[in-house]
Image (cartoon, grey):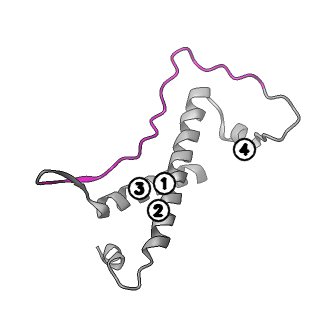
Amino acid sequence: KKEISRINGADFDLEKFSNLLAEACAMVLLLRLKTFLRKVYKFSELRCLEYSPDAKEVQKHLHPPENMPIFNASLEMATTAKRGGKCHDMDALYRLWYAQFRVLMRAEQS
């Protein structure tokens, strides 16, 4: 609650925070896509790290599985019930996105 109360402060730079949040959301999507593709194609982390799009060496052809799963690119939205519909619970939303970001970054580092 203390951190969220800072958002309402007069000295809080909402534009900078919004930009950071947008960048974190983009990173979450990229990390989720990387994890998805690693599982589908059964790549090791080493193979991902060794890949270079500039390499002159021809990469082995990739063959997707017969039943290719669909990547879910949607970001979860935290909502709270309100009369006449739903509104976004920004506190919960920030916590949710930050938690996803931390989990994925920890998985990358291990």
Range covered by the magenta-colored residues: 60-82
Q: Is residue 81 magenta?
A: yes
Which residue position holds label 1?
25
User: Which residue: 61% across, 20% down?
Assistant: 64
Ranked by sequence position, the earlier of labels 2 and 3 is 2
User: Which residue: 56% across, 27% down?
Assistant: 40
Element under disc 1: helix
Which residue position holds label 4?
49
61 up-or-down from 7: above or below: above
44 or 27: which is nearer to us?
27
Specify the amino acid type for callout 2.
Leu
Specify the amino acid type for callout 4.
Leu
Ranked by sequence position, the earlier of labels 3 and 4 is 4
- Residue 16 in view (yes/no): yes
Mark 4–mark 1 distance (CA, rounded to whole Å): 22 Å
User: Which residue: 35% across, 79% down?
Assistant: 6
**Cβ–Cβ below 8 Å for labels 2 and 3?**
yes
Label 3 crowd bin: few (<14), some (14–19), many (20+), radius 10 Å: some
109 to the left or right of 76: right
Specify the amino acid type for callout 1.
Cys
User: Which residue: 66% across, 41% down?
Assistant: 45
48 up-or-down from 62: above or below: below
Of the two numbered discs 4 and 2 in the rendering, the one whose residue sits closer to the viewer: 2
- Residue 110 in view (yes/no): no
Mark 2–mark 3 distance (CA, rounded to whole Å): 8 Å
Outermost residue to the top: 66
**Cβ–Cβ below 8 Å for labels 4 and 1?**
no
Which residue position holds label 2?
21
Which residue position holds label 3?
97
110 or 96: which is nearer to us?
96
Mark 2–mark 1 distance (CA, rounded to whole Å): 6 Å
